[in-house]
């Protein structure tokens, strides 16, 4: 067996790639004096070179102005969350007042559920995909218990059919229909972290609303990976993190979306803090919480400036590249990886790709289900300069993120796999 695609062809694809210059904007970890083949941007995106300067700028601002930094400089801290708003809105396809950057992902998931999971005796169930990211499972379970309910009966998990790895939309819809007016919340990931399946979010949102449920999405693996149209798709809320595809650094801040239809509803129950209070009165320190219009009204605390500064530096790159351009490259590059993996696997049967083959049902990640040789394959790839990740019990995930991966990188993955003998 051999790769039918040549290194020359991969290099030609790189030469045609209008986004290839963005690779130089990132810092790659080194392996034996060379850049690693970084396929792990779904877990922690690489560091943009501009982040260091952005952080230093805020340290200087602090050094120079102390507390006055809240009001001085070109990005006064007092308003820092606003400086991320337009870019975040473009990224997820929302109106600016529908998004806010704050806290971290699981915190925001809880804050959103405080408002949008309001179980009653009749309508109390949460529907979610089976095998969701553990933090989401714990969040759902603890929310249900906090309302005095039993997760066994209140959480409905939808699993793939016997012998299948990913969910069928028709099964999700049938289940929503079946649970009907007992459903309080339909909560889905955008892209499943394990299989890489991108769910049909608009269809799910419509079906959830049709039975009178609220709808929420966790876009941790979708934001920065695929173009999203949250306003039009219509979920009640969504949350995402910034350190995976959004390259904003470990523990980076989270984004939250609250649909416009809830923007001006001060009576919606929520956990409040001073940064969500009407900013005109914020410093009058009076009793009586009056939420800001839109997603801003869910803020608790003043902005985490250092984390936000790194996030902003990264969002600037997304704006410069354009999400649609990134997606066009991503579709091409993931198909290229798929083709090369299938060729390298011929006759070896080391793995099966469980991510949907349909580009509309996936982002850039491909998940390889391996057998007993899987861990050895993964270790071999690591020893040879590939940074990918391993998910128990037996999945290798490759994410050729379009911002900084080259077609040559992808080709080398195939070449390496060919050299693995077990
Ligand atoms: C990465 C990820 C998380 C992590 O949550 P943090 O609160 O940022 O630690 C949660 N949920 C999903 C779906 C994820 O992919």
Image (cartoon, rainbow, N blue to C red):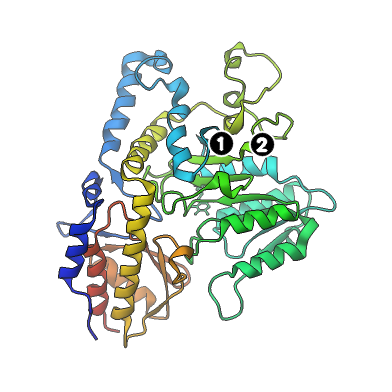
Q: Residue at x 35, y 40 (%)?
A: 319
Residue 341 x, y percent position in the rendering: 32, 75
What residue is pinned by disc 2?
262
Residue 158 - label:
none
Q: How many marks?
A: 2
Q: Is residue 300 above or below residue 135?
A: above
Dot 1 crowding, Cα within 10 Å, few <14, some 14–19, many 20+: many
Instruction: Provide the secondary structure element on which disc 2 rests.
Output: helix
Residue 98 - label:
1
Specify the quadrant that holds the C terminus.
Answer: bottom left
| Residue 46 appears left or right of 246 | left
Residue 379 x, y percent position in the rendering: 31, 70
Which residue lies most toward the top here? 284
Work out whether residue 397 can be spotted.
Answer: yes
| Residue 417 appears left or right of 294 | left
Q: Residue at x 56, y 53 (%)?
A: 135
């Amino acid at each position: 067996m051999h790769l039918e695609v040549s290194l020359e062809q991969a290099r030609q694809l790189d030469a045609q790639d209008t986004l290839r210059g963005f690779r130089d904007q990132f810092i790659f970890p080194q392996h034996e004096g060379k850049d690693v083949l970084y396929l792990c941007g779904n877990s922690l995106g690489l560091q943009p070179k501009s982040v260091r300067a952005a952080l230093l700028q805020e340290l200087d601002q602090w050094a120079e102005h102390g507390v006055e930094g809240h009001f001085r400089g070109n990005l006064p801290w007092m308003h820092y969350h606003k400086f991320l708003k337009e870019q975040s809105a473009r990224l997820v396809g929302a109106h600016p007042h529908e998004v806010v950057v704050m806290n971290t992902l699981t915190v925001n998931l809880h804050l959103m559920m405080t408002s949008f999971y309001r179980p009653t005796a009749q309508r109390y169930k949460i529907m979610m995909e089976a095998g969701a990211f553990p933090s989401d499972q714990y969040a759902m379970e603890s929310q249900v218990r906090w309302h005095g309910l039993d997760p066994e009966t209140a959480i409905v998990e939808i699993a793939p059919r016997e012998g299948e790895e990913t969910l069928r939309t028709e099964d999700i819809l049938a289940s929503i229909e079946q649970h009907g007016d007992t459903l309080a919340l339909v909560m889905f990931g955008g892209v499943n972290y394990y299989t890489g399946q991108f769910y049909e979010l608009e269809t799910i949102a419509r079906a959830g609303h049709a039975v009178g449920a609220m709808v929420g999405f966790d876009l941790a693996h979708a934001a920065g990976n695929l173009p999203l149209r949250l306003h039009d798709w219509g979920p009640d809320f969504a949350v995402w993190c910034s350190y995976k595809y959004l390259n904003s650094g470990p523990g980076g801040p989270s984004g939250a979306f609250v649909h416009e239809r809830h923007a001006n509803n001060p009576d919606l129950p929520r956990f409040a803090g001073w940064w969500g209070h009407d900013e005109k009165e914020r410093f009058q320190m009076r009793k009586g919480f009056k939420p800001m219009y839109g997603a801003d009204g869910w803020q608790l605390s003043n902005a985490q400036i250092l984390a936000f500064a790194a996030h902003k530096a990264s969002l600037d790159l997304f704006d410069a590249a354009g999400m649609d351009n990134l997606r066009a490259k991503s579709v091409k590059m993931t198909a290229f990886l798929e083709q090369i993996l299938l060729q390298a696997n011929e006759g070896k049967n080391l793995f099966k790709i469980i991510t949907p083959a349909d580009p509309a049902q996936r982002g850039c990640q491909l998940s390889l289900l391996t057998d007993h040789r899987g861990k050895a394959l993964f270790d071999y790839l690591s020893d040879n300069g590939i940074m990918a990740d391993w998910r128990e019990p037996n999945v290798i995930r490759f994410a050729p993120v379009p911002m900084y991966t080259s077609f040559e990188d992808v080709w080398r993955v195939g070449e390496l796999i060919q050299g693995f003998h077990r």
